[in-house]
Image: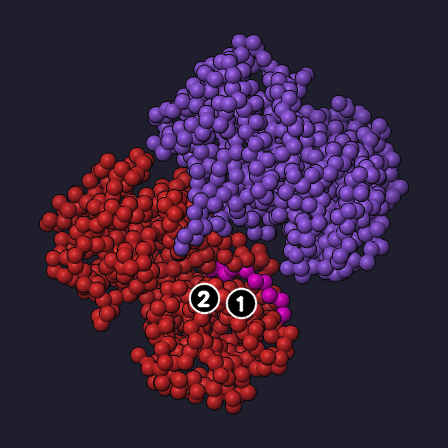
Chain colours: A red, B purple
Amino acid sequence: MSDGLEIKARIEALREKMSEAGADWYLMTTADPHGSEYINPYYREREYFSGFTGSNGDLLVGKKEALLWTDGRYFVQAAKELEGSGIRLMKMGQAGVPKLTEYIADKISMGECFMADGRLISADLGKRLALLFKEKRVIFISDKNLTEEIWENRPSDSAGKIRVLPESLTGSNPSRRIGHVVVKMREHGAASHVITKLDDQMWLLNLRGEDIACNPVAYSYTVINGRDVSVYLKKASAMTSVCDSLRHSGITVKDYDDFYDDLEKMNLEAPVLLDSNNINYRAYQILWKKGRIIDKINPTEEMKAVKNATEIAHIKDVYLYDSAILTRFLFFMKKNAVRQKITEFEAAELLDGMRAQLDGFRGLSFPTISAWKGNAAMMHYEATLYDNAVIDGDGLYLVDSGGQYDGGTTDVTRTLVLGKVSDEIRLHFTRTVMAMLRLQNTIFLKGCTGLNLDIIARQPMWEMGMDYKCGTGHGIGYMLNVHEGPHNIRWAHRGERPETPIVPGMIVSDEPGVYVEGSHGIRIENIELCREITENDDGTFLGFEPLTLVPIDLDGIIPEEMQPRDIELLNNYHALVRKKLMPFMQGEDIAMLNEATKAIG
Amino acid sequence: MSDGLEIKARIEALREKMSEAGADWYLMTTADPHGSEYINPYYREREYFSGFTGSNGDLLVGKKEALLWTDGRYFVQAAKELEGSGIRLMKMGQAGVPKLTEYIADKISMGECFMADGRLISADLGKRLALLFKEKRVIFISDKNLTEEIWENRPSDSAGKIRVLPESLTGSNPSRRIGHVVVKMREHGAASHVITKLDDQMWLLNLRGEDIACNPVAYSYTVINGRDVSVYLKKASAMTSVCDSLRHSGITVKDYDDFYDDLEKMNLEAPVLLDSNNINYRAYQILWKKGRIIDKINPTEEMKAVKNATEIAHIKDVYLYDSAILTRFLFFMKKNAVRQKITEFEAAELLDGMRAQLDGFRGLSFPTISAWKGNAAMMHYEATLYDNAVIDGDGLYLVDSGGQYDGGTTDVTRTLVLGKVSDEIRLHFTRTVMAMLRLQNTIFLKGCTGLNLDIIARQPMWEMGMDYKCGTGHGIGYMLNVHEGPHNIRWAHRGERPETPIVPGMIVSDEPGVYVEGSHGIRIENIELCREITENDDGTFLGFEPLTLVPIDLDGIIPEEMQPRDIELLNNYHALVRKKLMPFMQGEDIAMLNEATKAIG
């Protein structure tokens, strides 16, 4: 994209601005003002000033040095992209490599001036910086942005269309949902509440937008102040009909660009509820100065995780259609991929095109991962037209994909055996299947969190002395972001808040895997709906129902490596898949489905 | 023991004292000044004033009412023991029953006076009370005890002998251990440290005492103040040789009874490290008033949980001898219990007597649980000479027992099938064996806590829609308390501190069970030593080695209910047991061991 010299020039331009502003350091992270996971190009300033295009990176520019922190997924890519830029790569998590804040604490001198755009750093990072600046009396300026004037050909600020979802799709309406949030605010003793997280607001207001690729959200801020509810939307986004609908629910519509000024001036009833894990430093600072803060998870985040009956009914339909499409794609690949020497990119295009034909399709829920052999060992691999492998010879093909539909957001991964693979690969495949199915069939007491469940999936890997370096599962939005909290399935507790129990109505991914660098990557991912199994004197027992109904490639299985119970789980799952998918099959796919879901063992 | 009228008279006497002191409420919990799990009779004031003898209960006396809170284990017993006393039983955890603090908050009136002996309530409870008294301006007196003058024939204050352990048994000495604690204090930024937890002090100072039954501890307080270390011991306990030995390590020996006065006057270097979960309210208050507190787990608690090489070598020996004795006892019971109509009490006496003959035996680590049929479903059942069942007919016999030895503290449970039992009981037995063995053979990444591991043992129960209402595992002391923290194996996180990972050198019990009220109780408990299995790029993998080597009764097993892997684990374990125990067997026990450990499946 940009060569080293260009980057050097940009950083020099920034240093001039810094010098004018009296700043010794300038920090750019990877963020929009809402803490979104995917970032609209408009906010990719770190990319513009570093040349590094990965999805996670912090760029720190000092008067003489510039450094970029990124994680293990991007070490190779970042090293390549930073070449000639003079930016030093800081490999996060590697021994001897200080963290961003540690580095700053070490290098910053008494009385220096540190700058970052407070809208584009998290409250958490801002607070930690402010704390470590105290002793050294560092001046911390966070209400200015120095990059705007330098950035040439900056992508335009998105203002996609906003639409209002009918109650037939959401099973609720803004008034009712706001009512529930207000009850929760009162439980916490709060009189007002500021929400900046986009998907939380979309859920609350029954809105969907187009401001971030794959995430159907609109840039927005919501303020619940006593009895008044205001939502700040982009003028160009909020059509008259949207505004009317919101006003009909008693919500005042204001201009997105006025939010910070308004917030400064606003007479907010105290205490104010906010989620410091999901708010930017600028908004946090304004609210903090106003007085009492109650720092808790957004009630919206907790509520939207538990899908209601209407949502669940739609989700089940959508997953069935989506499963049928993927199954037909997998059958095609099984037959033709190697013979036709299809590329990873072509395969992704084909699958995306098949999904696009489904009723209610509105786009992908994330860029399709279509990966052959060693490429599948890179967890966030994305084949591009210019750089992708040809599926040829023997190996494993992994496809992780999903769609946004009217009625749900899908996410599913399957791994196919093409040709002949080694016994070791088949062992890894078998273990992955055992892991996924065991978790899918786990029974657990109400109150359990992902911390309790994770080992069920991980045990078959750990027994081999292997581990997958990612979570086992994440929540999924309803016509919203493919990654959604607050629950998850992982073994290490993060942050200070307790983990959220997995309760009926929640959906969560179940995606163990094996990743061997340069050789193969296996991931088999079903989406599970949590439901109650039984209730008795010993408690309420919960379990999962698979929403994903796609055959698991039997060519990867070594039945002798499985326990009889594992084989039973696989055969039961395949019988269900066969029954549910058969109505969608025609021609030779009928025979293929029968073959793909036959009982083994 | 005491009848209702006697209790009424005692409470009236207390009310008179309360009236003299101007108190409206008086609270007694179940505690000594050190937060010990088992309470020396000297401190059982709650028992004296209520007649309730259970191990957990809070007695609240008001001007007109008296109430006792206890948990589900004791509902039946408490109801019986409180009869005629006029004390109202508050069943903890039952719907509609307020908690102690909720009740107080509700009933106490503006400006009233509340009393409790601050030494005999936890800092945590004291702080919560003080907080809820603030609004109602309640006077909270916590530096007086009103029961002392009323209590007739109070048991004498224990002052058992103290002995110094040789380095050959502990693998370390007080100077070195204090050195490690001081390093940890510095890491926390603390300049001084007060320890009131007894087993922590015993470990730190290489001392053992006799002040609490089954727990070889001596009443003591330790203060590390900069470079000075003082230990407060009872005059009658600390022999000259003990004092000399401590002084040799640079430790000042002071009088136990001077502790609180000294603490008030002491020039303690700030900040002071203390563990508010393991200190009484009086000591906490004194320290809190002095200034900065760092509230963290005692470093001693963390350090003593990880056994050193010397300790582990002794522990392995002791567990082997202890396992051999228990096995011989179990063989005897299997042959003779029903035929001779042995009572639960006689069985316990027999086992205790056999243990007493072992070299280095110093007492039981807890009162032996010897329970037949339905009695075994009560988790804390203790047969007494006057009240215990005859082992007769068909059923399950459960024995949970352990010893204190020079070289270790043991704890082990086995359940025997005597005669013929139902298929349902055998299913429960089989599941318990599967649960215990699966946990024993789990492989996990370093960093895992009991929260992660618990489900491995609980899954076979949860799959049946059953749950055991206790933890799966607890830490065990070395020549110390049979229950020891900070690690444990349970699924629900308690408290605010993060759980402690299970790391090599820790020992932990593995004791799943099935409890069916009035019918049967099954518990199979091995003690496991955590050790490293392998280390590679994916991390450090840990596992367990069983210290307990006692056959599991094959008569309880339904092999068809087990997976092949479960049968393999059982056969492997039994092969190990046979190999290790055979040298200890003679006569017909040799044949019995061969039979009891034969491979099945």
Question: What is the quadrant of the N terminus of chain B in the image?
Answer: top right
State the image coordinates of residue A308 (x, y, percent, origin top left).
39, 52
Give the residue at x 34% y 46%.
Answer: A436
* Residue A280, disc: none
- Residue B466 belongs to magenta span: no
Outermost right residue:
B20
Q: Which residue is mark 2?
A: A92
Q: Chain of mark 2?
A: A
**Residue B299 in sight here:** yes
Q: Are marks 1 and 2 on the same chain?
A: yes
B504 in relation to A215, above or below: above
Q: Chain of mark 1?
A: A
Query: Crowdedness of circle 2 by 10 Å Cα count: few (<14), some, many (20+)?
Result: some
Q: Position of residue A225 (x, y in %)?
A: 55, 68
Disc on res. A124:
1
Q: Which residues are magenta?
A: A290-300
Q: Which residue does the image show at 34% across and 31% down from the upper left?
A: B564
Q: Earlier in the sequence, mark 1 or mark 2?
A: 2
